[in-house]
Amino acid sequence: MSAYKNSVCFNEARRVAIFGGTHGNEMSGVTLVNLWVKNSAEIQRKGVETKPFIANPKAVEKCTRYVDTDLNRAFSPENLSAPGGDDLPYEVQRAQEINRIFGPKGSPEAYDVIFDLHNTTSNMGCTLILESSKDHFNLQMMNYIKKAITPASCLVLLNEHPLLKYSTSRSVAKHPVGLEVGPQPQGVLRSNIFEAMRVILKHALDFIELFNEGPVCNTLETLLAEMEYKFIGMEFPPCTVEVFWVSERIDYPRDANGNIIAMVHPNLQDCDWEPLNPGDPMFQTFDGKTIHYQGSGTVYPTFINEAAYYEKQQAFVTTRRETLVASAIRKA
Amino acid sequence: MSAYKNSVCFNEARRVAIFGGTHGNEMSGVTLVNLWVKNSAEIQRKGVETKPFIANPKAVEKCTRYVDTDLNRAFSPENLSAPGGDDLPYEVQRAQEINRIFGPKGSPEAYDVIFDLHNTTSNMGCTLILESSKDHFNLQMMNYIKKAITPASCLVLLNEHPLLKYSTSRSVAKHPVGLEVGPQPQGVLRSNIFEAMRVILKHALDFIELFNEGPVCNTLETLLAEMEYKFIGMEFPPCTVEVFWVSERIDYPRDANGNIIAMVHPNLQDCDWEPLNPGDPMFQTFDGKTIHYQGSGTVYPTFINEAAYYEKQQAFVTTRRETLVASAIRKA
């Protein structure tokens, strides 16, 4: 009966959004959100308002990643406060609009949770992407989902890095959660990827409902609540969560004109999340030479050979595998 | 010594082109052609002028399939003779330009062979695409390549159909050959797909060199030639070639507004070239219902869930497996 004493307290998550089509050619999220806009029964949870939302409708219509600029990098303070109206790039206008509906980013009025649904051409399986190692609500959610989908698995990518930070659509919410499922080519809908994403979302929404119905932080209220919710709510005691923490961005080898001169090595291709050790093959030049990884220790590469990252000069990212401790959480 | 009597005679194939980037986001062909433009040693063959050529440079620059319209459907008589100059869609202008350089289509001045390099998101492996069951030069080439790459394999798709015929870039040549290798997402370069394409091209060019150096049709010349080329040229006696002959185009199930309501069934996804029998699962609706194949007999589906064919209302094509007989060929 003392677990709550060391609990971190969060407001109930009453307002939840599910974004599809932040990138208009990532078809699982586009399709799921379009389905749920027509019929939301599947995403309804007691006491939660869940809003399915197409984030970049013009890009969805054209089945392209974006029209003017990457929406998922557009939610910077500069963009969100930029004057210019219709003269701004389409995605900057759209970021401002999304920030008005679901934010303002960083304010108490912002949505509690935004799930942003993405696909990748990389062989990443189901990946949940977090932006903070200190958001115990999200860490508890990761723990819940990982257990709920067993024996299937999903991994957690932690994109918390002073230099590689980018301003995502989901960053408007108090608890931003990216969901990245692959491999799936751009513009293609695969049933296995579609169903995997759907299952993760189901468990994520279940977690929110259980949290909202669970015991509260305040001592007296806790006692009352525990009597009342005994068979409904759920405790979230401290736990650990394995994450892959983004470390470094690795570009393709290029010539003096910026042209790519090598491909991801066949030994690395499709081996997202597997250890890459110093000396392991990393790239293969067009004339058959192998380029080896020269880092100082073992890393775990991911987003290997993602189509959309050629223009971002990124062949893959390296990560470190770490175990985070999540505090117990209770509702405030 | 009588094989030549029943031989079909073709002119030597002296002018050969290799097109990459007919679709600007199919990266194996784009990359190979760009390499060969810089250094053509690999594609040089004795007595053959081989020209590597980026067919749609604007689409390559944007890494998109096309700019205004699909170049690989643009080589119709109407387009090739259309007035309008700069007012025409970009790809129609480009088709006219390509027809001037490598054609005119259907004329004696046209290039002998055009290889057009494509990638698909479908699990098709190495596929050679022909447009005529009566082109014995190409059929002999298929036979040669299939034998040369053993134990690897490549299949032959015959796109000869009165209703599904389209006007390809390669159709400008006397002997058009499409090379389609997958699975590879659009905008991605995979080393395995790249190398597979490169090997097929090597054998295709070897075939042309051997044909050019082989015995001639004319009786007297044959005797002389056989003495001269005994250890250089090669006979191409009659042979059989297994082809998959395009039969029918199957669209995704759609609602009254044209929206897709089902995905390729997991039992069919990635099963290009495998038999599909009446009653087999074909699609899966978003609410989990299975739609079965209702045809009257066994077909062999291919181009299953190709990204670029959503806009063409095509989930896959069915084919019939047939064995064609190729006559002996000799140079005229």
Image: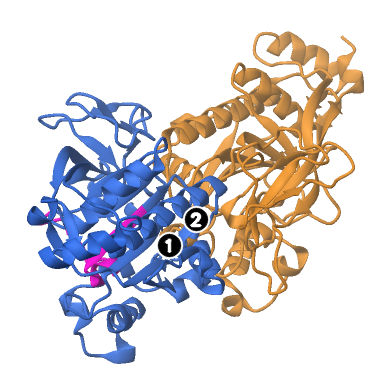
Chain colours: A blue, B orange
Q: Chain of mark 1?
A: B
Q: Is residue B173 visible?
A: no
Residue at (57% x, 32% y) in the render:
B201
Q: Nearer the viewer, residue B131 or B82?
A: B131
Q: Quadrant of the C terminus of chain B?
A: top right
Q: Where does residue B111 sit, x and y in percent of width and height? A: 67, 45
Spatial distance from mark 2 to mark 1, Cα to Cα?
7 Å
Q: Is residue A4 magenta?
A: no
Q: Is residue A316 visible?
A: yes
Type of amino acid under label 1? Lys
Which disc number belongs to residue B62? 1
Residue at (44% x, 44% y) in the render:
A183
- In this picture, residue A308 sits left or right of residue B102: left
Q: Chain of mark 2?
A: B
Q: Which residues are magenta?
A: A161-179
What secondary structure is found at the residue carrying circle 1? Answer: helix
For marks 2 and 1 on the same chain, the one whose residue lies earlier in the sequence: 2
Q: Quadrant of residue B38?
A: top left
Type of amino acid under label 2? Gly
